[in-house]
Image: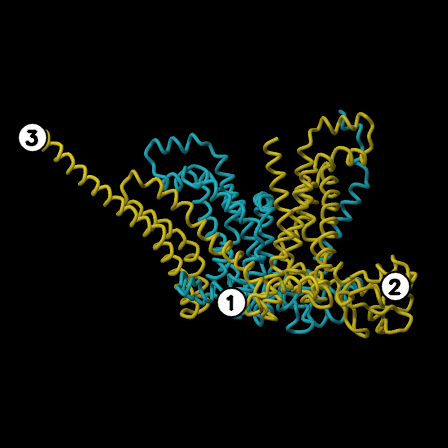
Amino acid sequence: MGGYLLANKLELKKISMKQKTQEKKLFTYGISTLALGIFPLFWFLSQAILFRELTDLVTRNVLVLIAIPLGSTFIFLLFLGMDKLIKLVPKDSREVLEARMFVGPSIFMIGLFLFYPAMRTIYLSFKDRYSNDFVGIDNYIWAFTDAEMITTIRNQVVWLISVVFLTLSIGLIVGWLTDRLNKGESFFKSIVFMPMAISAVGATAIFKFIYEYRPPPLTQIGIINGIRVSQGDKCWNNRIIDGEFYGFDDSSCLAPVGWLQQRDLSGLPIAESLESGGWFANMMINLPISTLLLMLIMVWMYTGFAAVVFSAGIKAIPTEIMEAGQIDGASELRIFRSIVVPYLKSTIVVVGTYMVVTVLKAFDIIYVSTRGDLETNLLAVKMLDEFSKYRNFGRSSAVAVLIFVCVLPVIISTALRERDNSEG
Amino acid sequence: MIRSTQKWYDKPITKLILVSIALTWMFPIFGFLLSSFRPGEAIKRTSWWDAIYTGTIWSELSFQNYQEVFRAENLDRSFYNSLAVTIPSTIIPITIAAFAAYAFAFMEFKGKNILFLFVVGSMIIPLQMSLIPLVQLFKDGIEIAGFPIIPALDLNGTFVATWFAHTGFGLPLATFLLRDFMMGLPRSVIESAKIDGATHFTTFFRLVLPLSVAGIAAFATFQFLWVYNDFLVANVFLGIYRPENLVVTSHMSQIVVGRFGEAWHLRTSGAIISILVPLGVFFGLQRYFVRGLLGGAVKG
């Protein structure tokens, strides 16, 4: 009898304990939803609404003054708030929540601002311009058949090949030659590297000044046209010598060329010297001068990056190997070809990957110089044009997906190689 | 010494090639910088090299263009806007990424590997992929089956839209780089702090964050220059909506594209001003910048 009672009592205690743990569990669940779900959402909305309202509420100077410190510290409120909430939970289940609290915001933001939009872009690329009806692969058919898109893709290919080749080769030369210097190495590297810090907009302004074209009687202020028109004995770029004015408005003088409007070689003296008919002449006559000149801006900007990376790579080559080559009497060119380049192979691939991705996303240079007109367009500019100028979300998304598909194999192959390297 | 058998680097040709490359690289800036000090009329009348040749340039140089670009063009306003966009857009992703990096480096939890793969995988998404839906998200929010997950916030045209956009685009790289850096920190120090009873929160703020300053600085320099020089994101989220919220790059693009025809005196002086800040950061923090750049080689 007593034994039975005791057993009963134990049973009751078990049930009440079960209830207690269930309560505890429920409490923990509540707190974790509050800490990891509701509070971050509340934080996000309050930051967004607060600053949106501030934009209209306060004067501009005050807005900027408030925005910098508050915008930078608001994020700490998120973590502090989550931490305070999590402290309410009993200690044994806190560990898991803390991990989620540390990782959560990062995953959430990447998901909301990068991953979800990217998925939606793929989805939108199969819909019509207003994102209403499905149109199948119509947008992609357009992307590969539209005349303007074909020119854009051609330009993108020209950019990819030329920019990557030029930045890598000049960068390799600069990196190697500076390494051979006794002094002044960092000076030369800094000069070539410096354009990397300049915005593409600024760099484009600088080069637009070089390519500048003004209609004939006006002084040529771009140096290329300036040199061009002052060739010949009687030709001067509107210079006043001893009070007398000398111009180039003479039939014997060369006329200035609108370089950024020059979509091929026609009208240039080189075109006349080309034999007509041959495939080489045909190819040359279609040489997109403006595209090549715009491309040089990017080469100017990124060569220094390649040089700095290569220079670091060259420093990592064991000196014994270089010296062994020298003792064997190999010429410097031979050493460069047989030792330096093979040693830098993986570095060259990494820099090349970086350049391919950068060129595929090149936007500012074209947008600021020609706005993509006159057959100079690139994919990234075309994408934005379709979006904001023509308001065709379907086509714009298709172009974006096209950029993504081009980037994908490059990066995946890099990642695979990286894995092989770390394993081997 | 063996080095003495090798005379190649002493040969003038090395220096000749390097000097000519350096001159080629400086040349575009030289004429541009010079023109920024010449009056607009003079720039159009004589080319800058003719002005040097004839010597008239010395009497022309002045700071007038710079005054004009500030006074008439409000470039200073755009400059402050740029800072209001750039500084939070650098700090927010770093803060979020540092917490996540700490968890990936020192904590054990379910789904750690999958989540990290998600972060790394997101690095390959070019920002063009996210642009359109993000604009729509900031305007109309997200609805699933008629139920609003994120309400219509109408954020476009405010600074906060660019902060969030840059946070999204910068986070994968930041998380990846900082985790890499924190993995290099001595594990024993963090473990001993844990034995002493420090919470993760304290360990993070007191121990890991101060130790990671070099890694954070590398990404911060990279992100600061990236955001300050960015034109696409600023143009899409700020430029079109509220002209008074223009950042420097958007403002410069308007001047360069030619709102005023041939205003080369404004184009030159404006561009020179706009590149002063990044150049200062660049020369001051070149070491960190290179490190961030190398890590950022795969940024999306």
How far across and how far down the image is residue B241, in percent?
52, 70
- Spatial separation of the CA atoms under disc 1 and disc 3: 85 Å
What letter labels the chain drawn in yellow?
Answer: A
* Tags 3 and 2 both on a single chain: yes
Q: How many labels sit on residues?
A: 3
Q: Is residue B188 above or below residue B155?
A: above
Tag 3's secondary structure? Answer: loop
Amino acid beneath label 3? Met
Which residue is labeled 3 in the image?
Answer: A1
- State which mark lies toward you, 3 or 2: 3
Amino acid beneath label 2? Ala
Quarter holding the C terminus of chain A? top right
How far across and how far down the image is residue B165, in percent?
50, 58
Q: Is residue A338 above or below residue A286?
A: above
Tag 1's secondary structure? Answer: helix
Q: Alpha-carbon neighbours of circle 1 within 10 Å: few (<14), some, or many (≥20)?
A: many
- State which mark lies toward you, 1 or 2: 2
Left or right for B222, reference A320? left
Taking depth in this image into account, of B71 and A338 the one nearest to the observer is A338
Residue drawn at 63 percent across, 38 percent down: A417
* Tags 1 and 3 both on a single chain: no
Residue drawn at 92 percent across, 61 percent down: A275
Mark nearer the N terminus (3 vs 2): 3
Q: Do we see residue B209 in this rendering? A: no
Is the Cβ of the residue at disc 1 closer than 8 Å to that at disc 3?
no
Chain B shade in the render: cyan
Which residue is labeled 2 in the image?
Answer: A271
Q: Do we see residue A200 in this rendering? A: yes
Which residue is labeled 1 in the image?
Answer: B245
